[in-house]
C-alpha cells in the first residue's frame, strides 16, 4: 500500500501593502488647504529700516487691491508710489496670484478624488501653483526696483524727495521683503505635490 499521498498545495497570497500615511487623501488635502488659507495673510511688506510701512496679502494681490498701511507713514508713502504708476500697479503680480490661488483650489478638489488620475492632476496643479508664486516674487521685485529707479531719477532732476522719505530719515531707504507666510505657502504647495506623488506610487 502506497503511503506517499500527494501533499495538497496551498496558495499563499501576501497581504496587500498598506497605503501608509502618505497614501491617502488627508496629507495632500491638508497641504493644499494650508496653502490656500495662507493667502489671507500678508505675503509682502515694504519696509524702511526694520519698520514695515505697508503690506499686502496674497488675497489682495489676487483681487488687485491696494497695499495696507502698517506704519505711521505707510499710507502716504504707498500713495505717492502708486500715483507714479501708469495704471499698471505691480506688473503681472495679480495674474500670478490668481493663477496660484486658482490652481490651489483646483488641486484641492482633484486630490479629494479617489482616482490616481486625480492625484496626478493635483500634483501638477501644486507644482504650477508654487511656480506662480515664485514668478509673482520676481515680478514684484522687478516692479519695485524699477519704481525706485524712476523715483531716484525724478529726485535728482527736481532736487526733492519725491517719496517723502525726508520725514523718515535720509539714511533709511525703502526695501521690499516677503513674509514667512509667503515662503510657507510655496513649501505647502510643494509638500502637496510630494504627497500626491507618494499617493500615486501606492499600488491598489
Image (cartoon, helix red, strand yellow):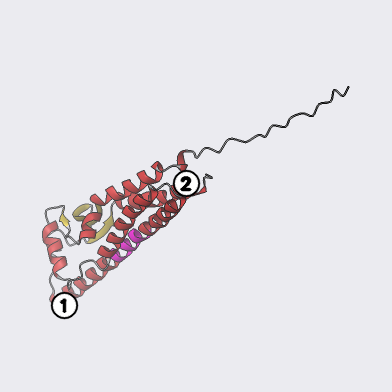
Crowd around label 2: few <14 · some 14–19 · many ≥20 (10 Å)? many
Disc 2 secondary structure class: helix
Of the numbered discs in the image, which one, if any, rests on residue 49? Answer: none
Residues in magenta, as a range: 131-141
Residue 57 appears in the rendering:
no
Residue 170 left/right relative to 197? left
Q: Marks 2/1: CA distance? A: 61 Å
Residue drawn at 58 percent across, 35 percent down: 15
Residue drawn at 30 percent across, 57 percent down: 102
Name the quadrant of the N terminus.
top right
The quarter of the displayed image where residue 175 is located:
bottom left
Magenta: main secondary structure: helix
Residue 135, magenta (yes or no):
yes
- On the image, numbered disc 2 is attached to which residue? 199
Residue 173's place in the image compared with 187, above or below, is below
- On the image, numbered disc 1 is attached to which residue? 157
x, y percent for residue 29? 37, 45
Residue drawn at 12 percent across, 71 percent down: 160
Extreme front residue here?
Answer: 1
Amino acid at each position: 500500500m502506497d503511503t506517499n499521498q500527494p501533499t495538497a498545495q496551498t496558495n499563499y497570497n501576501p497581504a496587500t501593502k498598506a497605503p501608509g500615511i502618505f497614501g491617502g487623501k488627508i496629507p495632500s488635502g491638508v497641504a493644499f488647504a494650508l496653502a490656500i488659507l495662507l493667502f489671507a495673510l500678508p505675503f509682502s511688506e515694504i519696509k524702511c529700516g526694520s519698520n514695515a510701512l505697508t503690506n499686502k496679502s496674497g488675497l489682495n494681490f489676487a483681487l488687485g487691491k491696494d497695499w495696507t498701511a502698517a506704519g505711521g507713514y505707510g499710507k502716504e508713502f504707498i500713495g505717492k508710489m502708486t500715483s507714479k504708476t501708469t495704471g499698471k500697479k505691480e506688473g503681472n503680480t495679480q495674474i500670478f496670484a490668481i493663477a496660484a490661488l486658482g490652481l490651489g483650489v483646483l488641486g484641492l478638489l482633484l486630490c479629494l478624488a479617489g482616482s490616481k488620475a486625480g492625484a496626478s492632476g493635483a500634483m501638477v496643479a501644486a507644482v504650477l501653483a508654487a511656480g506662480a508664486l515664485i514668478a509673482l516674487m520676481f515680478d514684484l521685485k522687478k516692479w519695485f526696483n524699477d519704481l525706485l529707479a524712476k523715483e531716484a531719477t525724478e529726485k535728482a532732476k527736481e532736487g526733492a524727495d519725491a517719496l517723502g522719505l525726508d520725514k523718515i530719515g535720509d539714511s533709511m531707504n525703502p526695501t521690499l521683503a516677503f513674509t514667512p507666510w509667503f515662503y510657507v505657502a510655496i513649501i505647502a504647495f510643494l509638500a502637496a505635490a510630494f504627497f500626491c506623488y507618494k499617493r500615486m506610487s501606492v499600488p491598489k
